[in-house]
Amino acid sequence: MKTKLFLWWILVLEALAVALFGLFVRFEDSANAETIGDSEATLAGSNQMSLYPVFQDVNVMIFIGFGFLMAFLKFHSWSSIGFNFLIAAFCIQFYILFFGFWHCLIKNEWDTPIEVNISKMITADYCAGAVLITFGAVLGKVSPSQLLVIGLLETCIYSLNEVIVFEEIKAVDVGGSIVIHAFGAFFGLFVAWVASPSATPQSPNNESNYNSNIFAAVGTLFLWMYWPSFNSAIVVTPQEQQMAVFNTMISLTGSALTSFGVSAAYNDSKFKMEDILNASLAGGVIVGSSCNFIVYPAVALLFGVFAGLVSTFGFEVFNECLASKVKLYDTCGVHYLHGLPGILGALLSTVVIGACGSSDYDLDENKYGLEGSFGDQAVNQLLALLITLVFAVFSGVLTGWIISRWNTPSELFVDKVYWTELETDQEFELVNQVSTPRENTPAQC
């Protein structure tokens, strides 16, 4: 790593952030010293502070769940956790600035400052989540400087897409199947395809071992437990929030059980850790766009089972096929945990939301805060998915081309390139005696 280059990146970007925060960012009235004692501001502050436990749940997912889930590589665990920390903190800062800029530009509201509250910090965490999904696709193949570039550009495009999807198209996506999971996955896939075509599942050091998979399992369990908070954090009404929590949890149980079953079917009645670590979470992704509209628990369970089936099948069959056929290697398999379930979640949300206006449900769209009918909203869901994929693909290709111009890691999938405490291969071997390849046998396309 070129230390001076990375140092200059940090100094310049943080100096820019400090200047822009000083000029444009303020706390909203509910957190403003000038409004202490004001009854309306106090009530608004109480409402915001009621979100603080959910905000911390989402924080746990971002900084612990994602970080440890990506620690499965035996020689890359420090970088997985450390760079996860680095990029998440970075994206939270710049999301606040980018979202405020795009909102002001599109709404033509330049006379108001960018306001910060707990709701905004939750959506900043969501942005960091999208970038960390991208990080999973390029894990072990990019340098810290390249990661900062990815984080900066993706945060910019993510926030633009978010403003368009939510404020212009009026899509419903409380759990982020579209704007977080599908966007982050396909952005990352095309960055990986352009920037690291030489990486393959058989690359040296692209291996896990017994201990590294234990770390990854901790990350999976944190994500699995807190996913209901992730999907319900920004839901407005208490009824919808409970529906989001229950539907997400039920869907997660379906994907978890299905991932065990399908994994055993593919591996002579044994389980593959890679399948369980990832596909068990797909149920939380697939209901993200519809979890506050699903009125029957059986529907959420069916979605979860379907997500677990598709995701596990993807890990077992398609990951090596993409690497061998189109030179696209997705280190963490984000295509099968986030990309495909995200698209399926968006498509299924059109069915669920469209059905809410049928005679069997006869729900009032006004109580959901929709500006049109449930049928109109179903169309909005499809439009949001299409725009999100266009943004993700084109910006991912551009970002991949930019980062491929310089500072490529000297070795892939290893910590020792970036951490002072790990200077030699012997030090790795002393603490990693048993390793297992990412794939035991090549999959047949």
Image (tube, rainbow, N blue to C red):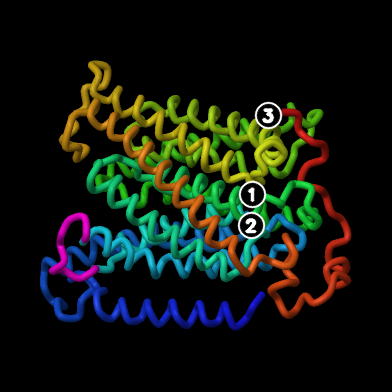
Residue 191 x %, y %: 55, 52
Does residue 190 lie above or below 340 as drawn? Answer: below
Does residue 376 lie above or below 203 as drawn? Answer: above
For residue 93, which quarter of the picture?
bottom left
For residue 78, which quarter of the picture?
bottom right
Marker disc for residue 332: 1
- Point out the image quarter for the C terminus: top right
For disc 1, the neighbor class at 10 Å (few under 14, some 14 to 19, many from 20) is many
Q: Residue at x 54, y 56 (%)?
A: 401
Q: State whether residue 275 appears in this view.
A: no
- Give the CA separation, mark 2 to mark 1: 7 Å
Q: Amino acid at mark 3?
A: Val
Left or right of residue 199: residue 440: right
Q: Residue at x 55, y 82 (%)?
A: 7
Left or right of residue 179: residue 34: left
Mark sitting earlier along the chain (3/1): 3
Q: Amino acid at mark 2?
A: Leu
Could you tell me if the residues under marks 3 and 1 are in contact, i.e. CB atoms within 8 Å? Answer: no
Residue 354 x %, y %: 29, 25
- Point out the image quarter for the N terminus: bottom right
Magenta part of the protein: which range? Answer: 105-114
Q: State whether residue 331 appears in this view.
A: yes
**Residue behind mark 2:** 139
Mark sitting earlier along the chain (2/3): 2
Does residue 351 lie above or below 395 as drawn? Answer: above
Q: Nearer the viewer, residue 294 or 314?
A: 314
**Residue behind mark 3:** 262
